[in-house]
Amino acid sequence: MDNKTLDLLEIRDQIDIIDKEIVELFEKRMQLSADVAEYKISNNKEVLDSKREKEKLMTLEHYASNSFNRVGVYELFRQMMAMSRKLQYRILAEHGKAGNIPFRKVSSLPMQKAKVVFQGVEGAYSFTAMHSFFGESIENYNVETWRDAMEAIKNGDADYAVLPIENSTAGIVADIYDLLVEYHHSIVGEQIIQVDHALMALKNSTLEDIKTVYSHPQALSQCKKFLEEHPEWKAEKYLNTAMAAKKVKEDGDLTQAAIASPYAAQCFGLQILKPHVFSSQQNSTRFIIVSKEEIYQEEAGKISVCFEIPHESGSLYNTLSHFIYNDLNMTKIESRPIPEKKWEYRFFVDFEGNLSDSGVKNALYGISREVNNLRILGNY
């Protein structure tokens, strides 16, 4: 073994010794943080003191000998302070100081005399999702827009609404995320539907006759490759896939076609000119079931939340780390611009858990103290 190898082994030994000392000091520091939590509980003080933390970080970084180390020290202690806060939030929760979650646990969703609203017409995918979730005997009616569905829930004209929120190939339905913020309704369930788009037209129409294709923007996006094979066609956006099929039937124009489900073709007496015109064979849409009631079922296993964070470096990481420290699996994150705040964003997060779980309560309490406008969208 040469001298350089020996030197490397010696250096690594020294690093191991230092790392062990760091762990011991870290544990001492966390114990002191626990003592601070007890003090704050007794004196009814907030865990986060942003002004003090910033002042302390600025002091600590100046102890470093060069600019690289100053950045490292700043980041190291910022994370250390974030860990201390998480411990303090957990202790506060154990003392019953985490506040109450407004949602009410139920054994099953109230279905007696329930009425469901969906956007579109019979033959729409939302119609299929509704029957898959509630059964075919459920009382229901349709409206023209997603906003109309949310208004129906708000006004008490319906108990539940069925809304598409995400497609496996086209991504999120952004308008639904915005409506969830605008209307303080709750997600109480979800239903995934396999999407099978077909091109349909009047009985006597042929592919050569077609000049205009109508469908919902999401469906047009999902069938982009097929439509690109026919540049002579004009793709027109419509409120709903089934409503597009209805339009083709009512207009009686041989040059019009619609992209919708085979069931829609059956409903409106159209012929399928081309089946399976979507780009992906794994094309599915996830629908959410929305209610005005803040309830969740005992076996619910997914939680959706949204929040706003300061436009600062590390703020998103610090927020999401609450899930890590409470051993919660985050399954999805999306962002949407906040219209009234230029270049600032609202984040939507899905994670596994139940609102009755202690880890979930700890995480939500910690997040609520460090973000703006945290809302629990639902547990389902």
Image: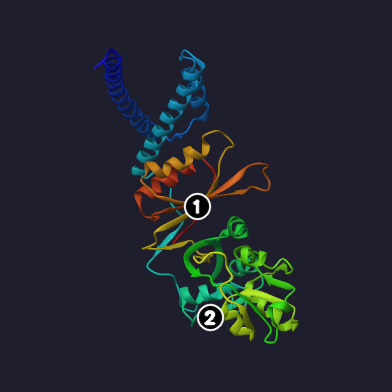
User: Where is residue 279 drawn, in percent x and y?
Assistant: 57, 65
Front-most of 312 and 158? 312
> Where's the N terminus, which quadrant?
top left
User: Where is residue 250 drawn, in percent x and y?
Assistant: 72, 83
User: N-terminal of the two: label 1 or label 2?
Assistant: 2
Q: Is residue 58 visible?
A: yes
Residue under numbered circle 1: 305
Within 10 Å of disc 1 (Cα), the crowding (few <14, some 14-19, many 20+) is some
Front-most of 84 and 224? 224
Q: CA distance from mark 1 to mark 2?
A: 30 Å
Residue under numbered circle 2: 139
Mark 2, secondary structure of its residue: strand
Within 10 Å of disc 2 (Cα), the crowding (few <14, some 14-19, many 20+) is few
Residue 245 position by quadrant: bottom right
Q: Is residue 48 left or right of residue 327?
A: right
Tell me if residue 154 comes above or below residue 310 in the rendering. below
Q: Is residue 310 left or right of residue 342?
A: left
User: Where is residue 183 drawn, in percent x and y?
Assistant: 60, 59
User: Where is residue 217 drawn, in percent x and y?
Assistant: 66, 64
Tell me if residue 254 comes above or below residue 1 in the rendering. below
Q: Is residue 258 left or right of residue 132?
A: right
Tell me if residue 334 comes above or below residue 231 in the rendering. above
Residue at the location (64% across, 66% down)? 220
Tell me if residue 137 comes above or below residue 5 in the rendering. below
Front-most of 231 and 126? 231
> Where's the C terminus, which quadrant?
bottom left
Mark 1, secondary structure of its residue: strand
Q: Amino acid at mark 2?
A: Glu
Q: Is residue 10 left or right of residue 106?
A: left
Residue 97 position by quadrant: top left
Colouring scheme, one of rainbow, by chain, secondary structure, one colour: rainbow
Counting every numbered tag in the picture gives 2
